[in-house]
Amino acid sequence: MTDFTKTRYTLAVRDLDRSTAYYTSVLGLGIDFSAPGWSFLSRGSFRVMLGECIDATPPAELGDHAWFGYVTVSDAAALFGEYRDAGAEFTQPLADKPWGMREFGIRTIDGHRIMFGQEL
């Protein structure tokens, strides 16, 4: 069976410059490369392609469909503190869950929601 070697989420954003700035300054991703209408970003194995779609329905209006990813990290408490200090908007506070994860959730400036968790 073939192994999956990387995953990159593709997200529609209305203002590419504003969203790229958020992902780099608040979430700490680096810019891998840019192309007209696109930003390719990553932090470790977490990869995102932001595509400018000015006429797309804003994710903030999608309700539960605004969730797009669960990212497993090595230290959820440290990342929570980093994101808190950077001004991230949290959808769920840092908490240990009965399913064996320490996790928290954020909402991006576009309204996409991401969960981050650490295996306990």
Image (spheres, helix red, strand yellow):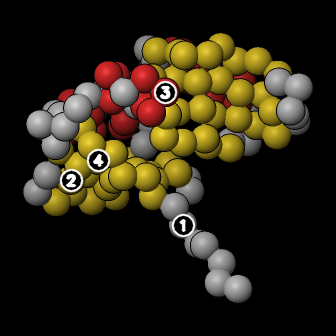
Disc number for residue 50: 4
- Please say if the residues under marks 4 and 2 sit with CB atoms less than 8 Å apart: yes
Q: What residue type is labelled 3?
A: Asp
The span from disc 3 to disc 4 (Cα, nearest Å) is 20 Å
Q: What element carries label 2?
A: strand
- For image coordinates 54% across by 42% down, the residue present is 69
Q: What element carries label 4?
A: strand
Mark 1 nearby-residue class (10 Å; few <14, some 14–19, many ≥20) = few
Q: Name the residue under label 3.
A: 64
Apparent side of residue 56 relative to residue 95 in the rendered image (left or right): left
Q: What residue type is labelled 1?
A: Lys
- For image coordinates 46% across by 15% down, the residue present is 89
Q: Quadrant of residue 110?
A: top left
Q: Which of marks 3 and 4 is in front?
A: 3
Q: Which of marks 3 and 2 is in front?
A: 3
Q: Earlier in the sequence, mark 1 or mark 2?
A: 1
Q: Which of marks 1 and 3 is nearer the N terminus?
A: 1
Q: What residue type is labelled 2?
A: Trp
Q: Which of marks 4 and 2 is nearer the N terminus?
A: 2
Q: Name the residue under label 1.
A: 6
The image quadrant where one finds the C terminus is top right
Q: Which amino acid does label 4 sit on?
A: Leu
Q: Name the residue under label 2.
A: 38
Residue 10 picture location, percent across and down: 36, 52
Q: Earlier in the sequence, mark 3 or mark 2?
A: 2
